[in-house]
Image: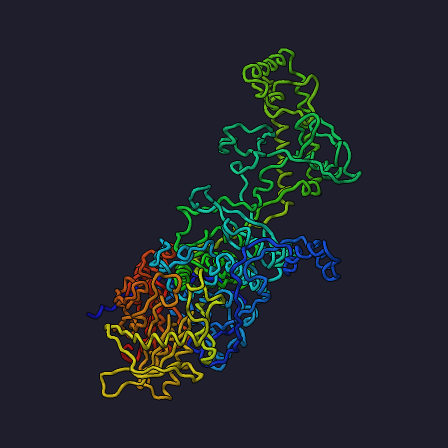
Amino acid sequence: MPRKATKPIPVNNDAVSTVSTYRHEATRKNIPPAGLAAQGKIAEVPKVRYAYDPHLPPELRFDPTGAADHLLELLEAARTRTLTAAETALLAEALRNQQPWLEWAGKRERRALEVDPVALHIHERVSAQAILKVAAREQVQRSLFADPEQEYREAVRFYQHDVNWANRMILGDSLQVMASLARRENLAGKVQMIYIDPPYGIKFGSNFQPEIGRRDVKDKESDLTREPEMVRAYRDTWTLGVHSYLSYLRDRLVVARELLADSGSVFVQISDENLHRVRAVMDEAFGVENCVSVITFAKTSSATGNHIASAVDYLIWYAKDIKKLKYNRIFKSKSIENDVGERFTRVELPDGTRRFMLPEERNDVENLPAWSRIYRHDNLTSQSGSDSTNFPVTADGVTITPNRGYWKTNQTGMRRLVLAHRIAAPSPNSLAYVRFIEDFPVSIISNIWTDTITGAFTDTKVYVVQTNTKVIQRCILMTTDPGDLVLDPTCGSGTTAYVAEQWGRRWITVDTSRVALALARQRMLTASFPMYKVKNGEVDGAPNPDAGFVYKTVPHITLKSIAQNVALDAIFARHQPLLDQRLAALNQALQVVTPELRQRLRTKLLLKQKQQGKRAISDADTRRWELPKKHWEAWQVPFDSDEEWPPALQQALQDYRAAWRAKMDEVNAAIAANAEQEELVDQPDVVRGVTRVAGPYTIESVLPAALTLDASPIGGEPDELESFDAPAARSSATNAEAHLDKILRLLKADGVRFPNNRVVRFVRLEPLVSGTYLHAEGEWASDEDMPRRVAVSVGPEHGAVTAMQVEEALRHAYRRAYDDLVFAGFSFDATAQGVIQDDTNPQVRCHLAHIRPDMVMDGLLKEAPNAQLFTVFGQPRTSLRQLPDGEYEIEMEGVDIYNPVENTILPTSASKVAAWFLDSDYDGRTFCITQAFFPDKSAWAKIARALKGVIDEQSFGALSGTTSLPFPIGKHRRAAVKVIDPRGNEVLRVHSLDETSY
């Protein structure tokens, strides 16, 4: 039954002004959109293959050449004959070389690293702001997606000119992608920070998540990911155990170093299992001298076992060039609670009283009197100085000349410190500098982070291996500025991208897992952030963080800043005459005190000492009750009076203390005004009333090169031995011809299974050596009188069938008049599916046959599959309706979901998909998400709360449903629906808005 027309959604006209994003001035290369990849030329780069010796244990060596292995032979020979000059030189060199290095299997044999800098192409453009505009029933401009909207002639000039910046999520091998960024896009030397979170251990399931909504991953066969790229990544990393792991990591560190700016940093997150080995590898890649620190941070859970549990992980931090390192200090608040060593133990009261804090005051500073100032005594001398800093100093009636060392300032500076009451005499034989806790109310964080444990108030964990945002946040803030570029070649759930977006950094993140990128895409799309105030500048009408944020600051008052503060001299000169006058009046009033009163006051002092002990007697007690016989010096004046004092004396003391307080208020204000200000880079000013969403970003993947059969795109095999844990454990193909032979042989034997469980088998299937994307031709049985001529195009062994492959294969299939064209692949780009749907030629029927992923799991599964290997399943079940007002809406009814574990196709309702997206004006080049729907009703919850009153709740409710919001017909008169299944696979359907749906 047709749905009723959607009720118009209430709109707040201020929506545009309350939802914003950041835009950067930077540019990026014009890489091919998936729909245009076949229409431009991209340079090809050959690939070199290496093998490793699997028999050497990782060990520290002192000779990288291996020549030292002959030393024992030389020593034995020296007993019987004279060594040659070459042998003597070798022995001498070995004795000189005492710097160890880490050796592992294959390292000595592999002298160089060669990587294929693959081309990339764009599948999607994502703009959270555009989706919110649609939800608010506003018009959407393509500029919100950072779409350059180029003319065709410019659009196909791939990698030849720059376009506006958009952040990037890239599906592919991190080594190849980083090489591509460095060489094809000239990003070498332009990345400010790289964060690498490699697998910690050797278990397959513990490193990879097979489904979007499932984090309880075990090491059972049913839990293994079936993504070919992930299987390859696992083999690359752990084929030879720790040996290939170290090679895997070293290769990526070498390319990462090329990408880093001279002031850049790289962080590798690791557990204690491989900490020592990875540290040695990084020493080689970056140089021992460029090690900045090893940071220890607390983690949520600790592994249990037979021995002590590990409650921490580590960050190994290296600079490309430590002399040029960009480093922003990160501070934490200084308080009594985190006072290391209990150094701040004293307090100054408003009347000038200085005493030790009471236990209840240290336990809770709220128990302190109002306007109290906590302080500590600090060193006033240094080991170095000159005659100008060695002189007697008098303070509080104590005169001291340093016996060893020198004062930290000269006589002029010391006078200012004394008059500012910054010098105290803790004992008759010493002077100390008075340092208040608010002089510098923060402290620099060290390399031990104990506040990084995730808990109830941290981000919800969505991925099996997900780092706490606080850990990455500190790394980014310490080593980058707003607008700098951050790279994470181990994307996972997208934590690095999330944090980089929050703090106004540009970002690129890479992963081999579709599940990981699907989670990261949803996380970024539904995230909301505070709008931080930028100093100046806009890009396309949006704030530009490249100019920097306006940060909160804290004063940093030092002994030096007070000693050199000339503004204090005028304050001292102005207040001292009045203080002298008030002191004289106080001493005059003292003369009327009788001996009897002096004795009674002294008795009070002795009584308190007897009852509470000598330690209970404070300086204030002594000054109040132990009155001098003649007069007070300035440093002896009482802080308060006793009730038995004569009224005139009480008033005189009150007048003196008022004058002293007025002087000190002005002195403290002058000290604060002259203090240096430290920016708190983790506390920028927030613009109230504005919700910020993620800026535009693209979803990209590796584009296999258009090669002939002899070097076909069906290659891409891992750079490793053909063995996995044992020589017989892996028998999969290691070159294009072998892989093609395997696929065609199995295809001919097993046939193709269609959605109605009908199996069509080949009568004939023979390989083609044509130099095109058609790899085989044959015939299969048909209900018609004549067999149907069939062409086969096989996709990459470790990747998806692309739009380029589909377009090229279709072109050749038309020319040769085939009846059917079968694309056999482990996965299919959504754009490739769109190309097939866009093809209106009725002569060739196209079929997308999914190869059972277990075929590349050799050595990981107990039983290899031998049946039901090639399966065709349909498009998303969607329906297009035109509404009475002329707009359209699309209902997503469901999709056929393939279960690779059970090798079954399940017709699934719309509520079971991971997500579905709509491009309401599909141009055939790139899918631009204008509406995003997540069955998880909590997906939009956070941003919905942030925009409460701006966009109606009904809109966000619709974004978890199965029917799109109404949309008008666009320039291209087409709409496309993309559905994401729980394993991150994508299927696409294109609707023409002029005709019925495809």
Residue drawn at x 41%, y 78% is 805
Residue sticking out furthest to the right: 387
Residue lying furthest front in this view?
A: 80
Q: What percent of the width, then of the height, locates residue 441?
A: 57, 42
Q: Residue at x 37, y 78 (%)?
A: 835
Q: In front here: 533 or 982? A: 982
Q: 827 or 685: which is nearer to us?
A: 827
Q: Position of residue 377 (x, y in %)?
A: 63, 33
- In the rendered image, is residue 484 in sight? no
Compared to residue 408, the image places residue 727 above or below, namely below
Viewed as shown, does residue 976 lie left or right of 395? left
Relative to 193, say whether 987 is above or below. below
Residue 850 in the image: state x and y as whole percent: 34, 72
Q: Quadrant of the C terminus?
A: bottom left
Q: Position of residue 100 (x, y in %)?
A: 63, 53
**Is residue 839 at all visible to an observer of this figure?**
yes
